[in-house]
Amino acid sequence: MAWCLAALLTSGAALGSLNLFIDGVLRDDGVSRALYSATMALLVVLAAALAVWQSVGPTATAVLVVLGDAVYVTVALTTTDPLLYAPPLMLLFACFAAAWFLGPRPLLLHMVLVVLACTAALWGSYPDPAALTVHVIVNSVVLDVVTLWVFLLRRRVQRLLTETQALSSTDPLTGLANRRWLVAQAPRIWRQARRDGQRVAALVLDLDHFKRLNDDHGHATGDAVLRAVAAALAATVRPADVLARTGGEELVVLGLVSDPSEARQLAERLRQAVSRSSAETDQPVTVSIGVALALPTSVDEVPDALWRLIDRADAAMYEAKRTGRNRVTVAAGAAAPRPRDPADESA
């Protein structure tokens, strides 16, 4: 936003400064030329300030838009012929900035100021009040309609962007986070673990005999079971934990623990929550859970460390299935294993 506003201010100042070198554009009195020059210089200073700060808040943006309206009136009053050298089209700079960056209320204020600015700029060019009124209405309505249309377009773009971001980070069936969001949150968890001296725990959950459930009762029933399990797990995990569906009937919980016993306790709560979710679908469901812990270090490549940790938890989960299912198995050790071999990755 700051860079865009700075570009608009710079463009306006550059184009407006050309009038200083063209005879007959500005009024002959020294006050008009001095005021015009000071106005262009102010635009340059504001653009430089925005480029340095690289940040601008809603209030400052609204002030800049109002300033743009005032600059147009100043230009119109200091030129010899506003119709020729300061047409209302110049207000498009402020209109586009207002439409793209302001909220509804400041935008409405700007649209009212557009009418006032057009009236002040064209006042001396139309001695007949009726002609002045017609031209003010035509110019201000065109500018305000364009402003409103760009504002509505911007809102539509923002809604589409929000929906796209939600789709890119959310599993559509369960409403849980997906793999992308899990990876995106891993650096935060690694930083917090190093800061607090805790371990990162990865819990891999896989529903038992889920394929058989789909085959016997259909995929609609399987989807209902997944949604019920997801709701039960979401209500059980801690607020800081990341719960994600990584594919099929497999889910991952990533969080911080102080020791293996705390990780096991969390896993047991999740296992019991899955069992209780059977009441929602009348389909008995259990889960095997593998747990692995790691002590993060400052040299960790977080995405690689994350998937190595999940691999260890995944292996522990398969051990839980091998030894009877519906149980928790904690992988040995709390540090990450050796890095993956490229050949293993390829396989």
Image (cartoon, grey):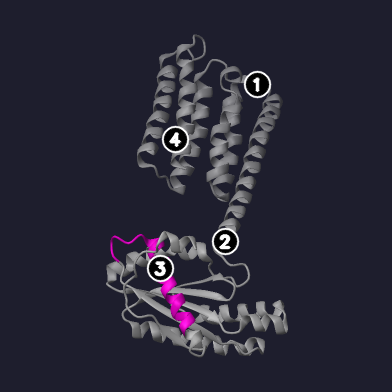
Q: Residue at x 49, y 22 (%)?
A: 16
Q: Nearer the viewer, mark 1 or mark 3?
A: 3
Residue at numbered disc 1: 126
23 w.r.t. 94: above or below? above
Amino acid type of disc 2?
Answer: Ala
* Magenta stretch contains residue 303: yes
Q: Nearer the viewer, residue 3 or 115?
A: 3
Q: Main secondary structure of the magenta part?
A: helix
User: Which of the 4 quarters of the picture holds residue 135?
Assistant: top right
Residue at numbered disc 4: 6
Amino acid type of disc 1?
Answer: Tyr
* Magenta stretch contains residue 120: no
Give me the C-alpha separation between circle 2 and circle 1.
54 Å
Residue 190 picture location, percent across and down: 35, 66
Give me the C-alpha separation between circle 2 and circle 3.
27 Å
Give me the C-alpha separation between circle 1 and circle 3.
77 Å
Q: Which residues are magenta?
A: 297-319
Amino acid type of disc 4?
Answer: Ala
Residue 20 picture location, percent across and down: 45, 15
Label 2, secondary structure: give it: helix
Residue at numbered disc 3: 308
153 w.r.t. 172: above or below? above
153 w.r.t. 329: above or below? above
Q: Earlier in the sequence, mark 4 or mark 3?
A: 4
